[in-house]
Amino acid sequence: MKLNARIIVLCAAVVLLTSAAFAQNPRPLARAAEEYEELLFTRSYRNLEAAATEAHLPSSLTGDGQPRLAAIYGGTVGCGCGDSQSDDRWNLRGERLREWRKNYPNSVTAKVAVASWPVELGWRARGGGYANTVKPEAWKEFYKYLDEARDALNGLDEDAKNDPGWFVSMLRIANARQWPPEQYEALYEKAQRKHPDYLPIYFVAANHYSPKWSGSIEELQRFIDRATEATRPKLGETLYARLVWSEWRSFGSTPTDWPRMKAGFERMVKDYPDPWNINNYAQFACRNQDWATVVALSERIGSRPVIRAWFDDVRYFEGCVNTAKARATPSQR
């Protein structure tokens, strides 16, 4: 009986540990951001500052190949939680950011984080709806916060104004404030030259050139081609895959170059074989009816897919795999 009781306890412990593991965000970048958010709110500024210092090294990446510095800014300045957090929680975030900078007055990351904070407040005031759904008072608040962030960022010292996070925040402001094309382009070119490996610069610029802002599918495609060419010596077609992935809603039914995207994903999962990358590669392969690739990737995924990569629908994953096995040639199964 004692042995059986011990087995039951051990099994229960395994279930709890497994459940905790699955409760984690499956995306490495978001998971890291949550960890840095926790450091901020628990006032663990010493650990946060140490992490920020390390994150400025080019080799400091999350498991899916994203810059860890992007996770720090995402977790401290903006949590990606939209309206899921209360006003009190958001106000406390601002207090913690200012306290971090006060304790570490020479910290470039803390300076940029505090200066960028109003951008998040602006988007919270505006909301994420279409422009025609935003109320006049919300627009007023939005632009007030954007201008506050712009002035704060421009008022920083030169070291802070050379930080990758500074450029990302300023590009977001330039986009929302609809800077003239030549002015926006000059800012992007400067950011890309100084930080060619900092992926968020390309993500925010792709968003600028997309149809949901002042761009078009054609402009978005040209930008993705240009950005991929600039990073090709180091990344090959990886940036093409990442940018089409990030802007898949913009493309809709517009065809993209699947062979290029596939080559980018192949390089990506070779360099960063995280389940998040592998599952998204398989999902895009299914959409492009590359059944042989779906079959090959399904063997790597096994019976535990990352459901969020499949639009939180396990049936979608199962349908793709079953269709792929039925349509792939015998030698491809």
Image (spheres, rainbow, N blue to C red):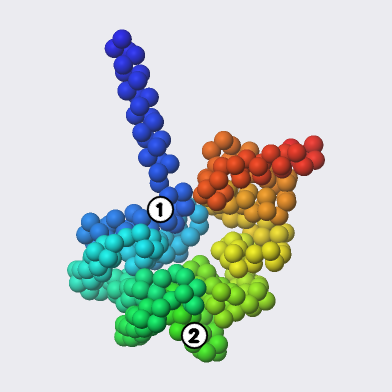
Q: Residue at x 32, y 60 (%)?
A: 85
What crowding class fits label 1: few (fewer than 14 Cα within 10 Å), some (14-19), or many (20 or more)?
Answer: some
Give the alpha-carbon distance from disc 1 to disc 2, as whole Å: 32 Å
In the figure, 239 relative to 177: above or below? above
Residue in the picture at 32% in, 64% down: 76
| Residue 90 versus residue 186 in the image, above or below | above
Question: Where residue 111 sits in the image (x, y, percent)?
Answer: 29, 75
Residue 68 relative to residue 238: left or right = left
For residue 182, above or below residue 328:
below
Residue 86 to residue 314: above or below: below
Secondary structure state at the residue bearing disc 1: helix
Q: What amino acid type should be assigned to the residue bearing mark 1?
A: Arg
Tell me the mark number nearer the camera, choosing from 1 and 2.
2
Give the mark nearest the N terminus, 1 or 2: 1
Q: Is label 2 in a helix, a strand or a loop?
A: loop
Left or right: residue 125 versus residue 309 is left
In the rendered structure, are the residues bearing label 1 and label 2 in contact, judged by CB atoms less than 8 Å apart?
Answer: no
**Residue 203 got which mark?**
none
Q: Name the quarter where the C terminus is drawn.
A: top right
Residue 206 is situated, as x and y percent measured from the top left of the image, at 56, 73
Q: Residue at x 22, y 74 (%)?
A: 105
Residue tagged 2: 178
Q: Position of residue 26 (x, y in %)?
A: 46, 49
Is residue 146 visible in the rendered image? The answer is: no
Question: Looking at the rendered structure, which numbered label has been put on residue 31?
Answer: 1
Query: Please, what is the three-letter code of the amino acid marked with disc 2?
Result: Gln
Nearest the camera: 106 or 295? 295
